[in-house]
Image: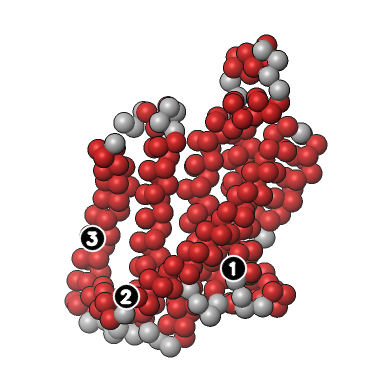
Amino acid sequence: MMRSVLRVIAGCVVPPLLAFALLIAFWESYIAWRDVSIFVMPAPSDIAERFADDPGFFVEEGWWTLYEATLGLLIGSIVALLAAVAMSYSRPLERAIFPIAVAIKVTPLVAISPVLVIVFGFGVMPKLIIATLLCFFPMLVNATIGFRDVNPAQLEFFRSINASPWQVFWKLRAPGSLPYIMSALKITYPLALTGAVVAEWFSGTRGLGYVIYAAWLNLRTAELFAAIAVLAVTGVFIYAVLSLLEQRLLFWHESVRSVR
């Protein structure tokens, strides 16, 4: 088990870390060579120094953003899964729900953020709504495909033993949809994080989005990039955790066994 965990961590974390290391080395060298002002572009050493001055500040604000994103992800995913179950069993319901989902997808949520602030105020609600809406469509599409991707022979077997629709769903459709749902989570969790950050620009008094916006207004570029770096590390950590969870849940599936 430990070997599998280390393999997943190495596969998900080491390649981006190497890429970031090369990028940072080039970045630091370019800033020193061109003598770029810190107000225009801080060097990685300046960003690291700002983070080291008060790491608790960035961690606390990062946790707040992660909390908003996670709650929005849960709400959006639950609603999407319920809608996907209904759509997978009923074509008329699919024709009724899917256009609404597409409309939500194509609506520029940045444009409606100020409206949400007017309606719901500067609390957590606007961030949750933005994160929820961003997560809804990818989860809905993937889950619907997953619930319908059933082996015909297996479905015929369940029918031959007079299995109820409830048993067919929990024993056949739900397990078969897990690879699609896990793939959707890898897409929607970063989207929820992005949605929470964008919403914090307009309605935040806390969170990394608010830190980025305030730092931009006051030309604190080192603080701005430090907050962005915390977001990037959070995204890599989330992806690694989801990949590990996928390995544990889908050990039986070809998509996992083929990479072992």
Mark 3: which amino acid? Ala
Dot 1 lies on which element? helix
Q: Residue at x 67, y 11 (%)?
A: 160
Q: Is residue 122 above or below residue 172?
A: below
Question: In the rendered view, does 104 fall on the left or right side of 11?
Answer: right
The residue indicated by pointer 2 is 55
Q: Picture coordinates of residue 150 (x, y %)?
A: 60, 24
Asked where in the image residue 168 lies, by quadrant, the reply is top right
Tag 1: residue type?
Lys
Residue 86 in picture, x, y percent from top left: 73, 38
| Quadrant in the picture for residue 37 | bottom left
Q: CA distance from mark 1 to mark 2?
A: 24 Å
How far across and down, in percent of the image, does residue 224 sit?
A: 39, 77
Q: Identify the element where label 2 is drawn.
A: helix
Give the residue at mark 1. 127
Tell how many labels.
3
Q: Nearer the viewer, mark 1 or mark 2?
A: 2
The tag on residue 21 is 3
Classify the position of the C terminus by image quarter. Answer: top left
Q: Identify the amino acid type marked 2.
A: Pro
